[in-house]
Amino acid sequence: MRIDPAGRPFIVGFAVPTILFALTGRRWLALPLGAIAAFMTAFFRDPDRSCDRVPVPANDVLAPADGLVVVAGEPEPGVAPPGKWLQVSIFLSPVDVHMNRSPYRGSVTRCDYRPGAFLAAYRDRSSLDNERSEIELVDGERRIVFRQVVGVMARRIVTRTQVGAHLDTGQRLGLMKFGSRMDVFVPRDCTVIAARGDRVRGGETVIARWNESVST
């Protein structure tokens, strides 16, 4: 399985002393360090998803990450960017795949990093107060805003895109270390498909859909 490059220093940093302690007979040290190395390997796994193999329908908005839907529908008070939006928020636990993907296609017109606090990612205030990266995508007259939001354990956001780049629906764009939340804001001419409590898979689960067809 593919491992994201951001995980290699963590994996190697625990795997090397694990091997050294095991070879010198200090298994009481090797075992816990080996368990951490295994956790790091699992955390930074990057499996392929259906969007990597087949085209995504033009009206579909996909989950940008694996996790639990904690908001679906009306936006939380004061959380949404300016405008009229619907909100889908996904909480990622430390055991979820943490690869982040673009929920829709389009050109990146804004990519803002904002430092902040490290509240639990499932709390509504985390979208406002926590460290985050906010990305705006525009495709013709369609616009989506989504956020990478860190949590209590997550202390580092990796965002591999910039203003002027073009993203495809489901394209890999970064991750957050370790445990976090993603917010997606879609216009009100979309229908939210996801429901609170749903488990979703990044790059596969449809969380919203534009109501009108795309003109060709």
Image (cartoon, rainbow, N blue to C red):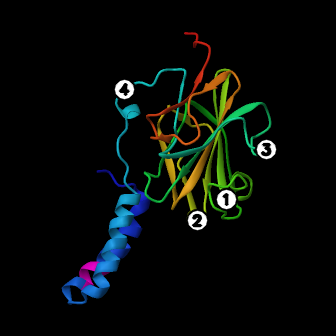
The CA distance from mark 3 to mark 1 is: 18 Å
* Mark 2 neighbour class, 10 Å CA radius: few under 14, some 14 to 19, many 20 or more: some
Q: Amino acid at mark 4?
A: Val
The stretch of residues the image draws in magenta is 17-21
- Marks 4 and 2 close (CB-CB < 8 Å): no
Residue 20 shown in magenta: yes
- Marks 2 and 1 close (CB-CB < 8 Å): yes
Residue underneath mark 2: 155
* Mark 1 neighbour class, 10 Å CA radius: few under 14, some 14 to 19, many 20 or more: many
The CA distance from mark 2 to mark 1 is: 8 Å
Residue underneath mark 4: 54
- Quadrant where the C terminus sits is top right
Q: Which numbered disc, 4 or 3, marks the residue that appears first in the sequence?
A: 4
The CA distance from mark 3 to mark 2 is: 25 Å
Residue underneath mark 1: 131
Residue underneath mark 3: 77
